[in-house]
Amino acid sequence: MAPIGTFLTIALVILLFLLILGGAGIYLLVKVGKKATKKARKVTTRVVSHVAAMDPGDAGEAERMRLDLRREVSITRQAVDDALQGGWGLGELPQLVAEIGSHADQLDAQLSRYAQQSRVSAYVDHATLSRLREHHAKLTAACARIRADLINDQMAHSASGIDEIQSRTDLEIEARRQAPVADPLDQIDELYNRTMIDRARPEEPR
């Protein structure tokens, strides 16, 4: 009876191990599947947005403004993140960029609704599109000004380092142009040679 009990125990342990492996595998597959689904949705959304932006009408213009706004906000956030990683003092600038992003999300939703309405109905208030253009211009201009200010700060910081390099280069070149300093070992060799020459000369008669 003991061997049978041992065999059953081993079989149950192996079965439990296989179940654990199976559960972990299913969990990983589900997790990877969710990530793949999210990526596929993002890619699909981008493709649809780019295709819709090719429309020459009001709907296409609204879609183009959406793409342009997303790009401007994205590269501005990246510029601020790079500056933060570089240790730059930005003050309230990160908070300002976050607020711009919030307004951009609202404008994106408004542009999306306007584009959808323009595609299904020919009767659209063009004054609304004019206001959307105005809001789009203000947000994109704010992003451009923030990036320009960050670039100016970085250029000013780099300029000080470049000026220091130039000064050091000038000093080094000037030092190399001056007469070389005699090597002490060469001086010792010269003194030794002179001593040997003096010894080799015959003494003058007294």
Image (spheres, helix red, strand yellow):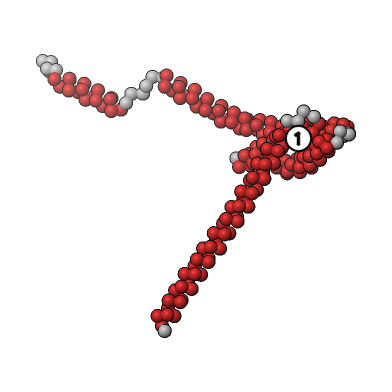
Can residue 9 be seen from the camera position used here?
yes
Q: Determine the image quadrant of residue 54.
A: top right
* The one of 27 and 85 positioned closer to us in this rendering: 27
Using the image, determine if residue 197 lies above or below residue 107: above
Residue that mark 1 sits on: 63
Please say if 30 is above or below 181. below
Quadrant (top left, top right, bottom left, bottom right) of the C terminus:
top left
Is 63 left or right of 160, judged from the image as shown? Answer: right
Asked which quadrant contains residue 146, the reply is top right
Residue 56: x %, y % from top left: 77, 28
Quarter holding residue 29? bottom right
Closer to the camera, 77 or 202?
77
**Number of marks in picture:** 1
Write the residue at 81% across / 36% down.
119
Name the residue: 41% across, 19% down.
178
Q: Closer to the camera, 204 or 110?
A: 110
Counting from the top left corner in percent of width and height, residue 31 is at 60, 55
Q: Which residue is depicted at the point 70% across and 38% down?
A: 48
- Residue 3 % position (x, y): 40, 80
